[in-house]
């Protein structure tokens, strides 16, 4: 149930004479489980709402315009995270060192957060009742971690004996009108090659599966006691790209999308900006470089700004960032930029992305850097949502004090990159 804590003035809720403390039990006979029920029915024109007010249970037949709202706020949203029941062989959380903040160890696998925030879910903890609710409340699109459609391989990869139902689950959701974006986290020699080809074929045959991201698994140095996993190199990364390109050519659409990391490892350019369409898989690291280049080039203009920056970035993106820093120097008189890729001592040198660089590694690198500069520039991808904290809980203020230099936070996009380096912020 949902307990009312506030009612907006002039809202439908006020017209119904609802009260603070009233409890919503159901909508159209369906239990009011969490905020999602309210959000769905608040967009409907007609429904029946069962409410407990004091000692009395009342049924309201609500009839309103689509753009009218009940105007209710609740004591809680009842959206406590549903956690993962799997023990995936590639799980990054299982490869985290001890002693970090508790939130980093949460293994979420919540279809509601998939709808609300775009989080990927495996569907292994979703019941028949959950499936009915997803379809009834039109929770679309969903983001689904498939990894492989072969049931036996999926059970082994996720270490869950119920993980082999994925195709029937996707088909049921698709038949119910739910659109889905999917992902395959590749483990070398396990779900790539011919297995990947079958997975892509199976997914592309389901009408409401709109895309499939193909991404590499992250491998840290904290894998003691875990199954051995080999990293992708230049040759094997190129093979993944070629497999996906061949598949897309066969079905005559860009259904499968390869993570930028594979292109960086293979040493080849990512696809052109137009290839990525609506950039539906951007949060999965797919199309980021293409969008960066597009937005960077759109922003270019002659400027003057006398400042010397040191940019620290992940090893994988060093050359890409260095190339665009050089262009920024050409367009901005007085600007000088050093770009350095930091090896990840904290998680291990196999982790090369910028977003997993921790504050202590930045401090140690900058202290050893022997060229003069005015400011350190770091990508916002290294920081939390508030742009104040690295993964190891080092704050931006602590970083500035340690290196005795100001720190400038650069937005992830190409336009913000150019702006952030060529003027005061």
Image (cartoon, rainbow, N blue to C red):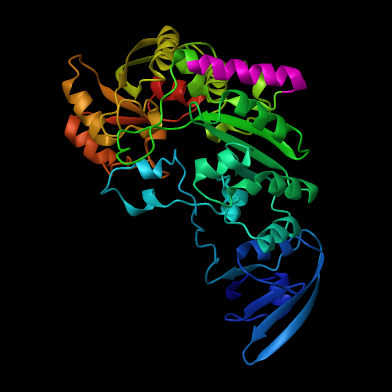
Determine the residue located farthest toward the front in the rendered image: 152
Where's residue 332, x and y in %?
A: 41, 11
Above or below, comparing residue 22 to residue 423 in the picture: below
Instruction: Report which quarter residue 245 is drawn in.
Output: top right
At 78% from the left edge and 51% from the top edge, which residue is drawn? 176
Instruction: Report which quarter residue 325 is drawn in.
Output: top left
Where's residue 27, x and y in %?
A: 73, 72
At 64% from the left edge and 34% from the top edge, which residue is drawn? 280
Where's residue 381, x and y in %?
A: 42, 33
Left or right of residue 158: residue 27: right
Which quadrant of the rendered structure holds the C terminus? top left
Which quadrant of the rendered structure holds the N terminus? bottom right
Above or below, comparing residue 142 to residue 376 in the picture: below
Observer able to see residue 145: no
Which secondary structure dominates the residues rendered in magenta?
helix
**Magenta highlight on residue 217:** no
Observer able to see residue 87: yes
Q: Which residues are magenta?
A: 236-253
Instruction: State the count of labels.
Output: 0
């Amino acid at each position: 149930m949902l307990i009312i804590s506030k009612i907006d003035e002039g809202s439908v809720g006020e017209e119904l004479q609802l009260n603070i403390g009233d409890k919503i039990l159901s909508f159209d006979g369906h239990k009011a489980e969490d905020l999602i029920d309210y959000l769905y029915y608040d967009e409907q024109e007609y429904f029946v709402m069962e409410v407990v007010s004091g000692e009395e249970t009342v049924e309201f037949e609500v009839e309103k315009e689509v753009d009218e709202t009940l105007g209710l706020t609740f004591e809680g949203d009842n959206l406590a995270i549903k956690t993962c029941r799997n023990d995936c062989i590639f799980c990054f959380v299982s490869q985290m060192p001890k002693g970090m903040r508790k939130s980093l160890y949460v293994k979420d696998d919540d279809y509601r957060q998939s709808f609300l925030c775009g989080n990927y879910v495996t569907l292994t903890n979703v019941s028949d009742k959950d499936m009915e609710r997803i379809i009834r409340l039109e929770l679309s699109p969903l983001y689904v971690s498939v990894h492989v459609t072969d049931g036996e391989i999926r059970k082994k990869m996720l270490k869950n004996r119920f993980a082999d139902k994925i195709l029937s689950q996707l088909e049921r959701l698709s038949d119910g009108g739910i659109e889905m974006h999917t992902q395959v986290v590749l483990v070398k020699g396990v779900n790539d090659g011919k297995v990947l080809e079958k997975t892509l074929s199976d997914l592309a045959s389901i009408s409401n599966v709109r895309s499939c991201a193909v991404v590499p698994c992250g491998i840290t140095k904290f894998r003691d006691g875990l199954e051995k996993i080999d990293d992708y190199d230049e040759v094997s990364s190129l093979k993944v790209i070629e497999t996906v390109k061949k598949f897309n050519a066969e079905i005559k659409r860009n259904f499968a999308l390869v993570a930028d990391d594979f292109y960086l490892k293979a040493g080849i350019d990512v696809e052109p900006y137009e290839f990525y369409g609506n950039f539906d898989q951007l949060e999965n690291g797919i199309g980021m470089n293409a969008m960066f280049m597009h937005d960077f080039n759109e922003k270019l203009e002659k400027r003057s700004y006398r400042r010397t920056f040191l940019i620290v970035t992940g090893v994988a993106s060093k050359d890409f960032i260095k190339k665009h820093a050089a262009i920024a120097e050409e367009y901005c008189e007085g600007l000088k930029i050093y770009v350095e890729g930091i090896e990840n001592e904290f998680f291990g040198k196999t982790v090369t992305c910028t977003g997993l660089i921790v504050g202590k590694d930045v401090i140690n690198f900058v202290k050893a850097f022997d060229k003069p500069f005015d400011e350190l520039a770091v990508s916002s991808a290294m920081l939390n949502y508030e742009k104040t904290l690295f993964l190891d809980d080092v704050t931006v203020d602590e970083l500035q004090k340690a290196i005795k230099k100001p720190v400038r936070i650069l937005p992830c996009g190409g336009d913000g990159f150019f702006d952030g380096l060529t003027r005061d912020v």
